[in-house]
Image (cartoon, rainbow, N blue to C red):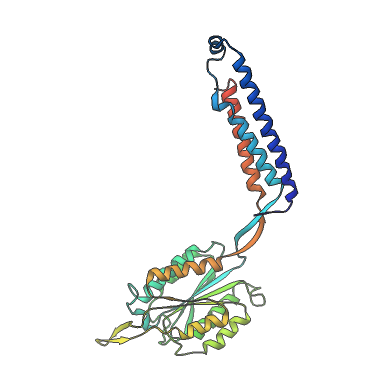
């Protein structure tokens, strides 16, 4: 925290002076009470002395003064705020290899669950869309703030959703960029702050070159965060036999590094959840310095009300 007008904090010296004056007055009152030697008469005159309650309103009042002085000095701090027009595209691989159960219960189910939780952590002002890809890519849910539509789209993801087998990472990036540029009428010429979250378990096998698609993302200033999940021992059952589908994150890493995004490896559903939460924090907000004087002034006003209530309740006829 810093202050726009730090010299105003010198007024705290005045508050300290009031504290000293109050303590001196209380000491003088104590000396006067001691000189009143007829203690039996004193008990009759003031049988119910307020004790600590006598000092509570004064304490509230002095704390209020200190807080108002701090607010007057215009404190500011780094505050996280949602990005305006921010857009996140989730691109999920729905190829056959995503049915491997080396990630519990299987790669695709784990990815769908993590995608839903990730979207739920984003500010409601964010636009979130969904792309499914295998041998081709298709927009399942255009980017919008409608979380219900997104949840329905995630639930509809299944192996073979795109109708073409393979793994088209380049097509997934290109399709996500097209969806971002179609967000609104200004997006084609003024790309909104955006991120692409790419989930896949293998190397590119069809469609355009992922490196070329990544170059387009660099031009649009849209980082691609790639998540490679699965293990080297993954397999799927086909035709009565197990087909090995080891994870291959080489292409995903290259795309992430080229676009200045992040590359992560997730070998379990719990780890994948943690990865999503880390990405959500990085793309969900921007940090800016804001005036926070209202916090101190508001708390000071609450203390002022406390001082007023204490005085009325304990030292008047208020029931």
Direction from residue 221 to residue 106 in the image, left or right: left
Question: Height in image: 289 above or below 104?
Answer: above
**Residue 66 drawn above or below residue 309:** below
> Which one is in front, 188 or 9?
9
Does residue 41 lie above or below 174 as drawn?
above
Q: Is residue 239 left or right of residue 65?
A: left
Q: Quadrant of the C terminus?
A: top right
Q: Tell me what residue is drawn at x 54 percent, y 61 percent.
A: 124
**Residue 28 coordinates in the image, percent (x, y):** 65, 22
User: Which of the 4 image quarters holds residue 101?
Assistant: bottom left
> Is 92 or 31 nearer to us in this picture?
31
User: Residue 73, can we see it?
Assistant: yes
Q: Quadrant of residue 195?
A: bottom right
Q: Exactly how many numbered labels are in the figure?
A: 0
Give how far across and how far down residue 70 sits, in percent. Answer: 68, 46
Residue 236 coordinates in the image, percent (x, y): 31, 83
State whether residue 75 is above or below residue 65. Answer: below
Q: Quadrant of residue 41?
A: top right
Closest to the observer, 165 or 1 = 1
Q: Residue at x 66, y 25 (%)?
A: 25
Please identify the quadrant where the N terminus is shown. Answer: bottom right
Q: Position of residue 37 (x, y in %)?
A: 58, 11
- Taking 77 as reference, is 205 left or right? left
Outermost residue, left side: 240
Asked whether the viewer can see residue 149, the reply is no
Left or right of 165 on screen, residue 23? right
């Amino acid at each position: 925290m810093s202050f726009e007008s730090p010299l105003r904090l010198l007024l705290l010296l005045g508050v300290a002076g009031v504290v000293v004056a109050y303590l001196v007055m209380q000491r003088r009152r104590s000396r006067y009470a001691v000189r009143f030697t007829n203690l039996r008469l004193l008990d009759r005159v003031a049988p119910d002395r307020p004790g600590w309650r006598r000092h509570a309103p004064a304490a509230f009042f002095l704390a209020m003064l200190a807080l108002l002085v701090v607010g007057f000095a215009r404190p500011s701090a780094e505050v996280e705020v949602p990005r305006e027009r921010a857009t996140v595209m989730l691109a999920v691989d729905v190829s056959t290899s995503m049915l491997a159960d080396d990630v519990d219960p299987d790669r695709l189910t784990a990815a769908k669950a993590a995608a839903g939780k990730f979207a739920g952590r984003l500010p409601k002002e964010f636009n979130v869309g969904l792309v499914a890809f295998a041998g081709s890519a298709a927009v399942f849910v255009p980017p919008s703030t409608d979380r219900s539509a997104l949840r329905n789209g995630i639930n509809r993801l299944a192996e073979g959703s795109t109708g073409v087998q393979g793994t088209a990472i380049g097509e997934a990036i290109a399709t996500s960029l097209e969806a971002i540029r179609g967000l609104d009428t200004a997006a084609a010429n003024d790309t909104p702050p955006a991120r692409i979250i790419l989930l896949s378990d293998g190397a590119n096998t069809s469609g355009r070159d992922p490196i070329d698609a990544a170059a387009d993302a660099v031009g649009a200033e849209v980082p691609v965060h790639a998540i490679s999940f699965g293990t080297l021992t993954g397999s799927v059952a086909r035709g009565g036999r197990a087909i090995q589908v080891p994870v291959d994150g080489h292409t995903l890493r290259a795309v992430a590094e080229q676009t200045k995004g992040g590359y992560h490896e997730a070998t379990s559903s719990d780890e994948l959840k943690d990865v999503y939460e880390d990405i959500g924090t990085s793309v969900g907000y921007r940090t800016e310095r804001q005036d926070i004087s209202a916090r101190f002034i508001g708390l000071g006003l609450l203390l002022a009300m406390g001082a007023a209530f204490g005085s009325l309740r304990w030292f008047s006829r208020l029931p």
